[in-house]
Amino acid sequence: MIYKFNVLPLFLLLFSYLNGLDSNSSSNGFFEVRIPTYNQAGRINWELHADEVDKLDEGIYSAQNPKMFILEDQRPATIANSNTGFFNLGQGLAKGGEHLFIEGDGFEAVGRPWTFEENITDARNCLAFSEQGKIGFESQVNAGFVGVSDEGVNKRSPKGKSTSIPDDKNSMDLPNLSKDFPTTAYGEKIDIFDLGDGRRRFLLQTDVFIEMQDMESNGSDPQVSTISCDWAELFLGSDGNSSTNLFGRISKIHALGKVKLNQPLRKSSADELKWSEQSGQVNLHGNAKVSHQKWGVAIGEHIILLEEDGRAEVIGGNQGRSKLLLPALNKTNPTK
């Protein structure tokens, strides 16, 4: 649904509404409220809807059942709602202690406590969770990254519940998203940066876990691969270095700190992982190790997991030679 706003009447509404709040000190409550905020060009940045708004201090207001419509090209590109919230409309700040639900182009998210800040460096705005959060992405990471073989393990259960998500993630006090997403990310701290033009940067910190389903795999149950690490960033849409139209799709994944990648038949670890939609390759840097159930173990400073055929290319570093440990011939087919 596309919302169209008439700027001048809404500007007058905001002016008269805020004046009303400032002049009414005995009864500070207003009901069924809509308050737009504007940028320097006179366009609406975002609009606050709430069942009730109360003035707490100069420029500070509390809201019951607030819903934020964050606009891009005069349409709501992001909608965020919670049970309660506190807003500084003049400075473009907001926060709340209860769960915030976010729906945007190509993703959904939920978490708490939450903050909102607009006009920050290198971004139009940022929505953040400071204790726990999760994100569901409509985009599927390409099959070359997710799957290695059609004999894979880590499949979804018939009820759609993942058997690969750690117990501490399943036990998070987080409401469910609206549906089962192909890619889901968890973190104790999450920042969602709106970069404009449909692009977003998701920064996840502390005990990060990413689950990716291969919806194109053979069989009724999709294969599942996972990444765990200390820190990760995902880009939705083009990262600015590609001319390819990636609107609503995950274009890059970057993970740091005790990185573990679990794929069907293959487990990998490294200090750093990089993947991009453009190359389709997974780059493992620093103490890289790849273990395959059938074909053995590869160790090197830098290992590239190739998309085309699932091979691993091992590149040595200055600290030592690369190693390849193969299983005994009787455990595999020597003709291959």
Image: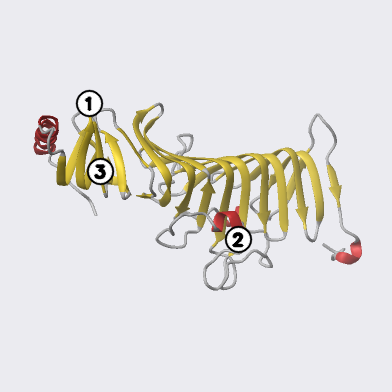
Can see residue 132? yes
Q: Nearer the viewer, mark 3 or mark 2?
A: 3
**Do the residues under discs 1 and 3 have CB atoms within 8 angstroms?**
no
In the figure, residue 164 lies in which quadrant?
Answer: bottom right
Kindly report the distance in space between the C-alpha atoms of the residues bearing marks 1 and 2: 46 Å
Residue identifier under label 3: 63
How many numbered marks does the figure carry?
3
Residue identifier under label 1: 40
Query: Would you say 303 lies left or right of 235 here?
Result: right
Residue 24, how many percent across, how many down? 10, 33
Q: Is residue 151 above or below residue 98?
A: below
Secondary structure category for the residue under label 1 = loop
Q: Which of disc 2 and disc 1 is earlier in sequence? A: 1
Quarter the N terminus occupies: bottom left
Residue identifier under label 2: 224
Q: Pick whichever, 263 or 211, lies toward us.
A: 211
